[in-house]
Image (cartoon, rainbow, N blue to C red):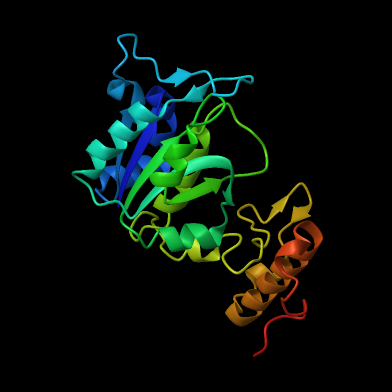
């Protein structure tokens, strides 16, 4: 997988992309992540990339020229499956979208800033707009980090245990069941005995029941069509 990110602040990605799973995925050659500073495509002598909006109003708008010049140059050497704009009014990212996108190969992600980007970029160059929630950030950089992490961890070979991603929250429109590890008894707080029983069938049933109960308690909008908490049919 190749992920190219267009941003005004490439330094923001240094920490997250050089740690943990993202770092290992790049070292294994499973993903290539490239950062491009949009200012490098500005034709203004001061490398300006924003201007006042036509029609007046507060805030500044990212100009069409440097963004499009950057997209066109990168697109001339890479056939992108998606050109994604991180936007608060895009489709809200969920696990289903991440699963679908993870099957693709090449992505170009545009991080907006200021009051947004010239609408013509969205109309003629963006293929998909994605939001990570109903709130506004100072820029699209952190949203791009979230999307990148969600995609990369789904690439085969990235996780040490490839079945781990299949049991994450939201894979079946359910949140994950509670998990425990050693010690069994900490100050009288004990692990449920079922998890030490060695009965895989009953453990699977218990985990499914717990996922259903937790989802109904915490995210009821996710599982309106799910079965009863008595467990899956055998």
Q: Residue at x 45, y 63 (%)?
A: 100
Q: Quadrant of the C terminus?
A: bottom right
- x, y (%) of residue 120? 44, 38
- x, y (%) of residue 169? 60, 59
- Is 118 placed left or right of 59 in the picture? left
- x, y (%) of residue 140? 51, 34
**Residue 206 against residue 4 in the figure, above or below:** below
Please indicate, yes or no, whether residue 175 appears anywhere in the rendered image.
yes
Give the quadrant of residue 16: top left
Which of these two is toward me, 196 or 169? 169
- Is 210 placed left or right of 39 in the picture? right
Residue at the limit of the structure toward the front, as seen here: 55
- Is 140 placed left or right of 212 in the picture? left
Residue at the limit of the structure toward the left, as seen here: 77
Number of marks in the rendered image:
0
Q: Residue at x 48, y 57 (%)?
A: 98
Please indicate, yes or no, whether residue 18 appears anywhere in the rendered image.
no
- Is 69 placed left or right of 102 in the picture? left
Give the quadrant of residue 108: top left
Q: Residue at x 70, y 64 (%)?
A: 222
Residue at the limit of the structure toward the bottom, as seen here: 234
Q: Residue at x 42, y 58 (%)?
A: 101
Which of these two is toward me, 1 or 125? 125
**Residue 63 against residue 212 in the figure, above or below:** above
- x, y (%) of residue 119? 49, 37
């Amino acid at each position: 997988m190749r992920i190219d990110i267009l941003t005004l602040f490439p330094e923001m990605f240094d920490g997250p992309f050089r740690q943990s799973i993202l770092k290992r995925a790049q070292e294994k050659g499973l993903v290539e992540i490239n950062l491009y500073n949009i200012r490098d495509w500005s034709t203004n002598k001061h490398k300006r990339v924003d201007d006042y909006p036509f029609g007046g109003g507060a805030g500044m708008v990212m100009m069409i020229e440097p963004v499009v010049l950057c997209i066109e140059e990168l697109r001339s050497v890479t056939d992108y499956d998606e050109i994604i704009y991180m936007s608060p009014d895009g489709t809200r990212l969920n696990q289903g979208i991440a699963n679908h996108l993870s099957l693709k190969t090449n992505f170009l992600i545009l991080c907006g800033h200021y009051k947004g980007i010239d609408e013509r970029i969205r109309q003629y160059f963006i293929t998909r707009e994605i939001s990570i929630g109903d709130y506004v950030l100072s820029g699209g950089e952190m949203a791009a980090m979230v999307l990148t992490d969600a995609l990369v961890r789904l690439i085969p070979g990235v996780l040490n245990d490839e079945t781990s991603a299949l049991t994450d929250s939201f894979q079946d429109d359910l949140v994950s069941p509670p998990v425990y590890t050693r010690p069994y008894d900490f100050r009288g707080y004990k692990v449920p005995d079922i998890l030490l029983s060695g009965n895989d069938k009953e453990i699977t049933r218990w985990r499914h029941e717990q996922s259903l109960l937790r989802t109904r308690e915490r995210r009821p909008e996710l599982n309106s069509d799910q079965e009863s908490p008595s467990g899956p049919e055998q």
